[in-house]
Image (tube, grey):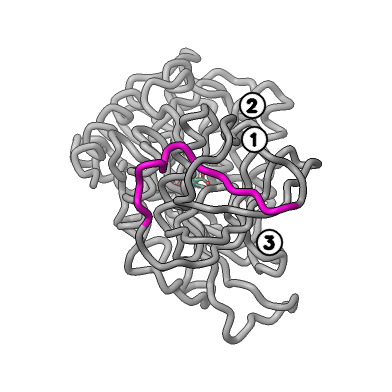
Amino acid sequence: MPAGNGTESLMIPAIRNLTITGHARTAGRIAIPDRAAPATPPQGNICTLSGPRRESEKQSIYAVKDVVSERLIKYIIPKTFALKGIPVRTVFLNGQYMAENEARVSIFDRGFLMADGVYEVTSVLDGKLLEYEGHTKRLVRSLNELDMARPKDFDALLDIHRELVRLNKVEQGSVYLQVTRGVADRDFAYPKDAAPTLVLFTQSKPLLDTPASRSGIKVIVIEDLRWGRRDIKTVQLLYPSMGKMMAKAAGCDDAWMVKDGFITEGTSNNAYIAKGSKIITRQLSNDILHGITRHSLLEYAREAQMQVEERPFTLQEAQAADEAFISSASTFVLPVVEIDGVPIGDGIPGTTAKRLRDIYIVESRKRAI
Ligand code: PDD
């Protein structure tokens, strides 16, 4: 492919026989890593892209010049990259599907400057969404609690989730959704008329037969230094990140947090213990995130005649329990086999956690959409 600052045309092999329909439009820039650029000289002119090449980034930046429909951005470019072994996801940003390396958000976005945003993570199993309704309800709650407007694509959220799962061929993994208050000059006061920024992307990863589900996880215990509205799922995740790093430094997998002598939750999951025939987990309040997995899990546990107590518990009670475990969208149920260096029960995954994990997977699979 010719280099330099002149106009270059590029025939993307995958679209050779495709007639692009739709409105001609300038779609900004398309960045193509050099290793993905076609080796053969351009043939034909179904799509003409032009622009300078950036040597420093080892990629070619093309301004879209000619007839380029949304189809090109949504389907063809990711496919072309995939053919060349370069994974490029299709993501969704403010009304448009695009290649992940094309998605750009302003430096003035309040999510970036103030952590002024909320998010949801919806798991995907068998290419279907788990607990979609619960996640959307909690998203609405988070937006309301922060007086944040709904993005204009809000009613189409389910379609967007499904379309991303389909386009990116996600069998197991998740859809991440984030809404921020939008772009405005930096000011602590909320802007009056900023349009919310809406971002969705997928992540493919195994959820079912993971090493952690077989061996269980080890947790350390740290003080809960997060803000007082942990029930709102905001993007301010620095303390949970610090907690995960502290756990890693201690040779563990995660951290449980303690406030006023009682465990609140894990850095990105709800915390439980089991003693005798009882399952104990902290009651809902502003101190913990109201886990969607937690909600369903407790319902399934009660249906299976298990006894559930929603109340605070201490580190000492947890260390003396028969079992401990966590729940979240991305882990379902995982046994906890050690807390702050003390083995729980026999120090191996217990039967209650295993049973609850199995029930949760079977039930949520049945309800997946
Ligand atoms: N975390 N508590 C906290 C602090 C969380 O961040 C999460 C979820 C949960 C479990 O909620 P749910 O069951 O709705 O996933 C509890 C997600 C998975 C994350 O941040 O990736």
Q: Is residue 44 visible?
A: yes
Percent x, y of residue 79 = 44, 38
Question: Quarter holding the N terminus?
Answer: top right
The amino acid pointed to by label 3 is: Phe
In the figure, 144 relative to 293: above or below? below
Q: Is residue 242 left or right of residue 363?
A: right
Kind of residue indicated by mark 1: Val
Q: CA distance from mark 3 to mark 1?
A: 29 Å
Q: Which mark is residue 298?
A: none
Magenta range is 6-20
* Residue at the spot of label 1: 221
Precedes in sequence: disc 3 or disc 1: 3
Task: Give amino acid for label 2.
Answer: Asp
Residue 233 is situated, as x and y percent measured from the top left of the image, at 52, 58
- Give the number of callouts: 3
Task: Please say if 106 is above or below 324.
Answer: below
> Earlier along the polypeptide chain: callout 1 or callout 2?
1
Secondary structure of the magenta portion, mostly? loop
- Magenta span has 14? yes
Q: Are marks 1 and 2 in contact (CB under 8 Å)?
A: yes
Q: Which residue is mark 2?
A: 340
Q: Residue at x 52, y 61 (%)?
A: 66
Q: Which residue is mark 3?
A: 112
